[in-house]
Image (cartoon, rainbow, N blue to C red):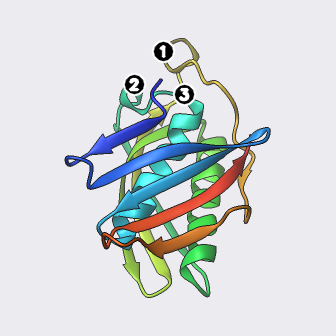
């Protein structure tokens, strides 16, 4: 499984970064929404190869927080909750942001242990190395560490 996923000629992508026993997830995109989507894809890639997850079922997720960084953690934790409760993995995300309110659809399918071969179970997104900012190229970076 790759440690990064590039989409749209490198404009938007996800990546992992090492953090002791846990795993850092990072999403980069031209918009805050794209960065949130890529961070979610990076989180899926901690568990399995996202290209092996069929986006067959849609799940709606809504959350709100006082700032972008806390909203990122809430978003990822809402996805983790849906993954656990529905026994699903997600591979496609559409995020809409209105200030610090997030409305999203995540598409995925039930976990198939043989096909998905889940590597770990993610327990939660943390505030460790939490960052949401624009880089010098104008791209948004969304990152934090997830507890595995």
Sooner in the amino-acid sequence: mark 2 or mark 3: 2
**Which of the labelled discs sits on residue 71, or is there none?**
none
Residue 113 pos. (x, y %): 58, 17
Question: Rounded to the nearest whole Å, what is the CA distance between mark 2 and mark 1?
Answer: 7 Å
User: Which of the labelled discs sits on residue 111, or is there none?
Assistant: 3
Q: Residue at x 58, y 36 (%)?
A: 46
Mark 2: secondary structure: helix
Disc marking residue 115? 1
Residue depicted at x 63% and y 65%:
73
Q: Is residue 126 above or below residue 111?
A: below
User: If you read the primary sequence from the N terminus, does the residue marked by circle 2 or circle 1 appear first?
Assistant: 2
Q: Say which quadrant the C terminus sits in.
A: top right
- Identify the element where label 3 is drawn: loop
Q: Is residue 144 left or right of 114 when viewed as pictured?
A: right
Say which residue appears at 54% left-offset and 27% top-offset.
Answer: 111
x then y, percent, for residue 71: 57, 74
Look at the picture and state if 72 lies above or below 114.
below
Which is in the foreground here, disc 2 or disc 3?
2
Q: Are marks 2 and 1 in contact (CB under 8 Å)?
A: yes
The Cα atoms of the two marked residues, 3 and 1, are separated by 8 Å
Residue 116 seen in the current view: yes
Which residue occupies 78% across, 41% down? 20
On the rendered structure, is 147 left or right of 112? right
Q: Give the x, y percent position of residue 142.
A: 50, 64
């Amino acid at each position: 499984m790759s440690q990064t996923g590039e989409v749209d000629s490198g404009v938007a992508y996800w990546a992992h970064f090492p953090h002791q026993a846990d795993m850092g997830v990072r999403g980069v995109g031209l918009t805050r929404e794209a960065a949130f989507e890529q961070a979610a894809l990076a989180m899926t890639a901690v568990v399995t190869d996202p290209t092996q997850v069929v986006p067959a079922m849609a799940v709606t997720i809504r959350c709100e927080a006082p700032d972008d960084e806390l909203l990122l953690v809430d978003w990822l934790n809402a996805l983790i909750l849906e993954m656990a409760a529905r026994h699903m993995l997600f591979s496609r995300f559409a995020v809409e942001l209105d200030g610090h309110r997030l409305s999203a659809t995540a598409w995925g399918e039930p976990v198939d242990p043989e096909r998905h071969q889940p590597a770990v179970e993610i327990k939660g997104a943390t505030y460790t190395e939490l960052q949401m900012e624009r880089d010098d190229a104008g791209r948004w970076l969304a990152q934090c560490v997830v507890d595995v």
